[in-house]
Image (cartoon, helix red, strand yellow):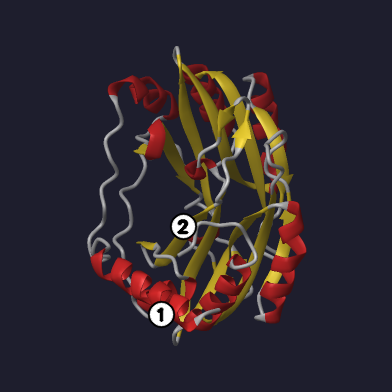
């Protein structure tokens, strides 16, 4: 890569880090328009507004104590269930989500979702050799937004997912994590959720399903999470959102940098263009891992600086 381009990219990332909101203060989500209140009531918690009138609800599995690779997983790191509603008019919505479930919760939750008209689009692992075993159920629906919300709430009630009012966001804390160095290495600025540094990288192309655009906040952005493990190290996980020709290029880039691939699969059924989701894991120097992740991002058509 031309040195002038590298220098410009580095300058832009440093500038973005310097002007980003302070990580020492929790950022308050935008208030939802009043017409989303019935969905919030049905789900039993407030949602966070995203771009283009998408409202997103988090269902972190704070009740689970899960260990993988000697690391106790924070909910924001790898146990963060969510559902996102996109308004399509006339009290209707397109809904996407990812529910985090214990193995014995899968069947009753699936039965309740099917009874409520909410489809399952994938069921699989995201990490390896975790204890206890965790499954991830991806869901989709299109229709009356309140009925969909009620169906999701009824289904989650078949699990031990905490369903009371959502806890306030954890205060950001960059203890023992070089977030500025990670941002420079990745070329993308993230945000802290408690001690977990979260980065989202949208695809360059428009993703369509059910006749409408599926926005990045609805699960079609590459997600990268860093959880500090001491001494400047971090565990990393998340998923790359890929087109078919990118899959093996990204596998090679990750493995060349000591990052393990833990799953490759679909999350959706009829999206255009076709997408694959690649999950990963490593626990090493955080900035070094960020450089490896950047090498993998460079093999994709993503919106990176």
Quarter of the image with the N terminus is: bottom right
SS category of the residue bearing label 1 = helix
Whether tag 2 and tag 1 are in contact, CB under 8 A, the answer is no
- For label 1, count other residues whose C-alpha is less than 10 Å away and answer few (under 14), some (14-19) or many (20+): few
Q: Which mark is residue 7?
A: 1
User: Vertical placement of 198 versus 181: above or below?
Assistant: above
Q: Residues within 10 Å of mark 2 (few under 14, many from 20)?
A: many
Horizontal side of residue 297 vs 225, given as left or right = right
Outermost residue toward the bottom?
231
Distance from disc 2 to disc 1, alpha carbons, whole Å, reads 33 Å
Tell me the quarter of the picture where residue 120 sits: top right
Residue 238: x and y in percent read 58, 60
Which SS class for mark 2? helix
- For the residues carrying marks 2 and 1, which lies nearer the camera in this image? 1
Residue in the picture at 49% in, 69% down = 226
In depth, the one of 157 and 144 nearer the eye is: 144
Quadrant the C terminus occupies: bottom left
Q: Is residue 178 visible?
A: no
The one of 5 and 108 positioned closer to us in this rendering:
5
* Badge number at residue 116: none
Give the residue drawn at x 70%, y 27%: 111
Q: Quadrant of residue 71?
A: bottom right
Determine whether, in the image, residue 245 is placed left or right of residue 232.
Answer: right
**Percent x, y of residue 221:** 54, 51
Q: Image point 33% across, 20% down: which residue?
A: 35
Mark carried by residue 76: 2
Residue 179 pos. (x, y %): 38, 74
Q: Residue at x 55, y 72 (%)?
A: 294
């Amino acid at each position: 890569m031309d040195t002038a381009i590298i220098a410009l990219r580095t300058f832009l990332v440093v500038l973005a880090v310097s002007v980003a909101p302070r990580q020492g203060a929790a950022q308050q989500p935008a208030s939802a328009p009043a017409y989303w209140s019935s969905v919030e009531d049905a789900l039993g918690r407030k949602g966070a507004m995203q771009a283009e009138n998408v409202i997103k609800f988090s269902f972190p599995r704070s009740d689970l104590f899960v260990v993988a690779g000697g690391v106790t997983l924070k909910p924001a790191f790898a146990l963060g269930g969510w559902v996102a509603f996109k308004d399509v008019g006339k009290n209707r919505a397109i809904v996407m989500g990812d529910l985090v479930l214990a193995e014995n919760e899968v069947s009753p939750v699936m039965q309740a979702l099917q009874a409520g008209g909410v489809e399952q689009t994938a069921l699989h692992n995201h990490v390896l050799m975790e204890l206890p075993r965790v499954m991830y159920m991806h869901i989709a629906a299109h229709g009356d937004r309140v009925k969909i919300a009620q169906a999701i709430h009824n289904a989650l009630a078949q699990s031990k997912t905490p369903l009371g009012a959502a806890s306030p966001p954890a205060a950001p804390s960059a203890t023992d994590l070089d977030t500025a160095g990670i941002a420079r290495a990745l070329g993308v600025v993230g945000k802290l959720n408690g001690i977990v540094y979260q980065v989202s990288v949208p695809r360059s192309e428009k993703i369509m399903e059910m006749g409408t655009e599926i926005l990045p906040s609805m699960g079609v952005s590459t997600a990268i999470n860093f959880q500090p493990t001491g001494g400047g190290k971090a565990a990393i996980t998340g998923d790359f959102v890929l087109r078919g020709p990118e899959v093996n290029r990204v596998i090679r880039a990750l493995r060349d940098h000591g990052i393990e691939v833990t799953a490759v699969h679909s999350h959706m059924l009829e999206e255009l263009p076709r997408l694959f989701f690649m999950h990963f894991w490593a626990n090493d120097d955080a900035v070094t891992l960020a450089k490896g992740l950047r090498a993998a991002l460079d093999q994709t058509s993503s919106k990176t600086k």
